[in-house]
Amino acid sequence: MEPAELQSKIEALEAALKTATAVNAEAFYWWCTALMVAIHAGFLAYEMGASRAKNALASGVKNLVAFAFLVPTFFFVGWWIYNAFPTGIIPGDASGATPWSANMGPNLADNASGIFWAAFTLFAATTASIMSGSVIERIRISAFTILAIVLGSGVWILGAAWGWHPSGWLNAQFGLHDIGAAGCVHMVAGFFTLGVLINLGPRIGRFNADGSVNEINGHNMPMSLIGLMLIVMGFFGFLGGCIIYTGDTWMTIYNTPTTLSAFAFNTLMGVSGGMLGCYLVTRDPFWMMSGALVGVISSAPGLDVYYPPLAFLISFVGGLVIPKLNEILLTRFKIDDAVGAVAVHGFGGVWGLVACGIFASGYPNAAGPAVSFYGQFASMVVFLLLGFIPGFVLSYILKVVGLLRCPPEVEIAGLDLAEVPVKAYPESRIPAFGDGSLSPAE
Amino acid sequence: MEPAELQSKIEALEAALKTATAVNAEAFYWWCTALMVAIHAGFLAYEMGASRAKNALASGVKNLVAFAFLVPTFFFVGWWIYNAFPTGIIPGDASGATPWSANMGPNLADNASGIFWAAFTLFAATTASIMSGSVIERIRISAFTILAIVLGSGVWILGAAWGWHPSGWLNAQFGLHDIGAAGCVHMVAGFFTLGVLINLGPRIGRFNADGSVNEINGHNMPMSLIGLMLIVMGFFGFLGGCIIYTGDTWMTIYNTPTTLSAFAFNTLMGVSGGMLGCYLVTRDPFWMMSGALVGVISSAPGLDVYYPPLAFLISFVGGLVIPKLNEILLTRFKIDDAVGAVAVHGFGGVWGLVACGIFASGYPNAAGPAVSFYGQFASMVVFLLLGFIPGFVLSYILKVVGLLRCPPEVEIAGLDLAEVPVKAYPESRIPAFGDGSLSPAE
Amino acid sequence: MEPAELQSKIEALEAALKTATAVNAEAFYWWCTALMVAIHAGFLAYEMGASRAKNALASGVKNLVAFAFLVPTFFFVGWWIYNAFPTGIIPGDASGATPWSANMGPNLADNASGIFWAAFTLFAATTASIMSGSVIERIRISAFTILAIVLGSGVWILGAAWGWHPSGWLNAQFGLHDIGAAGCVHMVAGFFTLGVLINLGPRIGRFNADGSVNEINGHNMPMSLIGLMLIVMGFFGFLGGCIIYTGDTWMTIYNTPTTLSAFAFNTLMGVSGGMLGCYLVTRDPFWMMSGALVGVISSAPGLDVYYPPLAFLISFVGGLVIPKLNEILLTRFKIDDAVGAVAVHGFGGVWGLVACGIFASGYPNAAGPAVSFYGQFASMVVFLLLGFIPGFVLSYILKVVGLLRCPPEVEIAGLDLAEVPVKAYPESRIPAFGDGSLSPAE
């Protein structure tokens, strides 16, 4: 063959390999997206199980509404925010992410926008679901929907633009290292939730007149545990969505090289460490599984760099501490967080970011300064405020206009009676499992 | 290096890339198949939850039997039908799909037949499961098994050969565009089910003497909702199985180019639109999750071409209308469809095909005329009849010979007592949850 | 272009394709790992459902503890055992698998160790979960944890080194063919469990004074069935983890070529055959789904070579026989295996290995003699002893020191009261579902 012919064959091969890579990347994120739906199935099971039977379906509806509204709002607004605001609050050029862009739809020349948008949309749904469990059994579905949209298609994605984007200013300014989105997803959602809980107030009967606490338990703990294990499975989709498939080296969101093998080591070690930490201090299976989440979140910022036993230890410490923080929120600050999401996601994220400043200090970034305790701490404060302020302000407004919370008589009777036209367990003669009437067979 | 040497290296690379593509395609469909098992897990949860407790296990057994019988029957018959009948009812050459073919087993020279067969087998199982939920609480397991085999390894796959095959006559003749199998899977299953329901009749107690309707609710709505969310996850396997991985451009089943990104956009928008449409008209979480299916089905035919907000709207309309259609079937035509599958899958598929004729009219096909309203409508009628007639005729025969339905006393006592040697909830003292005896601890 | 330039471009392409393959392999095993978490979610649902309500959470905690402890112990010990002991009991060089190795952590030059370790860790968790279900409702969580660690991070992985490793002595010596790990995972776990059950003894009330058997049923059969279907889904992760992704031909663990298509054919046929075999002899949905496992295990050793209808038949025979074996263990030998794991996994594995000696006899191995009945039988005996002896000895020691079993009063009251600080169903007034108190609404 002539050199010219050889050259053209080589060029064809180069093009084919490039196309194959684009296609394989699509396939990879397609499965990420699918597994993140498992997170949503898991949250659904987890929240319904964590509700008393009289509120089970209302909790579920809330979760479904969040998912359903986030998809279009994230299409019209969220994706653009991510692309427009990496440098702060002045929007940059994000013409490829506007809803009228040729990239935001079927486009044979774009094998990336749709699949990345989808993965991010599921991130958004996860973010809203984090809040969802905390506010069950008294929030209005309408108010929750508004809060979920603002959180999922607005606030967290602004945090992602700032701190989980190749050009985000937190990375450029502070050298923020947060590979697994502990800040923009978990902290933002956790502290947004804290803001909401302050205005929402505790469930009726949660506290006695003297301030002492009554137990309120979900009606179906096994369902919650299974749900939480589905969430762990789904985290492989979530964390897969945190790595850039280039077909060559895997890259972090900050354009530093990594491997999926590193993620595999530290994800499992994190899950395990968090579970064992929580087990040691609580013996409670609900907290063990919450500990799996604490573990993932604690190690998330440094998945690419930690020696696996270090990830285990960081997550173990997270697991030891978080249940106590939840208890302090409850007993000292009278925050009635039905599932502990503020502690798990909010303080879990704080610990994850700070731990990365301690243990990965000095690790170089592709752009911006090296990782440092100061940079991690400062970024953490940014995420905390970014989550808390809008959650507090918006829920305050909803409270003032009387839309935030169900009336007390609805709460006592159970939200399902007022907000859901069907029954969770229609055959049960146990009042709390249904309406108290005898089953038809009797 | 000499040109000859370079040439041989280039040829080796070309071969290696081709092999890599074949292997990656196998991996892609392997995960499609796995996630479609989640559809089956979902249907299992959904149907058991939608049954009264006295029938829960019988519903589950039915579902398991369908899966178990479809695998071998689809191996021996179904796959051959798909390959033999694209042109109509005269079988063509399908020697590679006969059960004695060297392709139908481990074959180092064939990295495709097994994995495609597996994905199609799970499609078949899905098809049978669609019928399964509608006929619970009174059909005999034996009759259901026969119907499931005919539907899953016969009828739908003939529809797939006709309308969801590169050489299918509906595409060649009418320019049918149905990327996501709304016709051959959903419509065929839905109208087959309608045919069965007509002969099967309503559950005892569903209608009063004056024709008014009594509510019959499943015993465990949370279980149904979780199951439905698992089905949504599984749909990523199903829709992944609707796209051809070539390693170069993704292709639709009709050999037109597409991207997985387009599928990602429109799948999520469809799910969301359907959920919100159903939510608006029902506020019922069961219908919201059925709406997710309505949404996927409504947008399925045009996943490759719709602008995502259009997919949202099409699915939203589907979600608005389908619950009403289900009610009309129930109140006007006395069709007792326990889960609404005729409306969701049957009419959802009708709307999906017709909508594609409205909104994608003029889109070119690789073979056959361009997409048109007429072509979509005509194909829709074909699928409707292809599903309805065998379902009606076969169930009529089963009815005449007295094999279709359980005796009334069995139905009243609960099918589990007669057809299942174990109890769903043996500790419950609630009659409907068990046998009415006291629990051992009392 | 000059030949030198062309050559450098070719070399770049060769390197790029090699990297792409390494990256795609990581992605493949990442999904394997994720789906094996579904096995764990499934076991959790299955075991809690198979427990009486008074023990449901204790069963769940046991399962979670196993997972949590196996991750770090498999990191520190298990992976090294696999790499050090293929030739028997003298450790070879396994420096890349020691916990201080540069391969055992993030390493930009190693895209394999982490992801393989993760997949193997989930295999280990599966192994421990197999035992977990059998010993519910009377074992101490502490004793179980010790047994689970020894089984999951010690015994089975030694079996894997011997018989499921490219250089394993069982392959080299006997030509062992066990593609799908029926021996090292299922048989070892099954017979380890048998050893434990002998020392643990039956649940109180399982046998009458005259030796006759009382039924003890799980409190939530639907939950168990859904769990088992999730396990079937997860088996696609497990079996995916049994094939070597090279980007060129797929290889078995013994370095013989195969295809994922072969796995797809025979996995589904095995699931189906096992389900139908069990259905025929029991009509019991719990056994049908256990039959799905029997089926996978029966066909697992020859997934790469069986003609699919042969896999169906082998698994069908397994499904016919295994429930009877479980009954014999119960009635003749008074082995109270709460979920039948000894029969399903232990004898299922025996049948799988032996069947492969019958039907794949003469199939060549890359190293070692061809497959033979003798070689399969001898290997089977090795796995049987390797599992049974440590399980029996260790549980005997635990029994002697009084740590193995809960005190009878705890067992009668329910393990949840003693070992778990929360209630499974706090609202239930049925004693077995809670504490017997009336629900708050009364």
Image (cartoon, coloured by chain):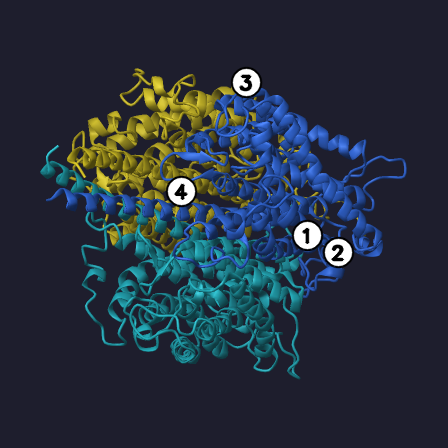
Chain colours: A cyan, B yellow, C blue
Disc 3 or disc 4, which is closer to the eye?
4
- The mark that comes first in sequence, 1 or 2, is 1
Amino acid found under the numbered disc labelled 1: Ser
Q: CA distance from mark 2 to mark 3?
A: 52 Å
User: Which corner quadrant holds the C terminus of chain C?
Assistant: bottom right
Q: Secondary structure at mark 4?
A: helix
Q: Is residue A173 above or below residue B61?
A: below
Q: Which residue is mark 4?
A: B237
Q: CA distance from mark 1 to mark 3?
A: 48 Å
* Residue B311 rendering spot, x and y as whole percentages: 28, 49
The answer to whether residue B220 of the structure is visible from this angle is no
* Chain of the residue under label 3: B
Q: Position of residue C140 (x, y in %)?
A: 75, 55
Mark closer to the observer (2, 3): 2
Residue behind mark 1 = C59
Q: Chain of mark 4?
A: B
Q: Are marks 1 and 2 on the same chain?
A: yes
Task: Report how far apart the C-alphas of labels 4 and 2 lie in the structure.
Answer: 40 Å
Q: Which mark is residue C415?
A: 2
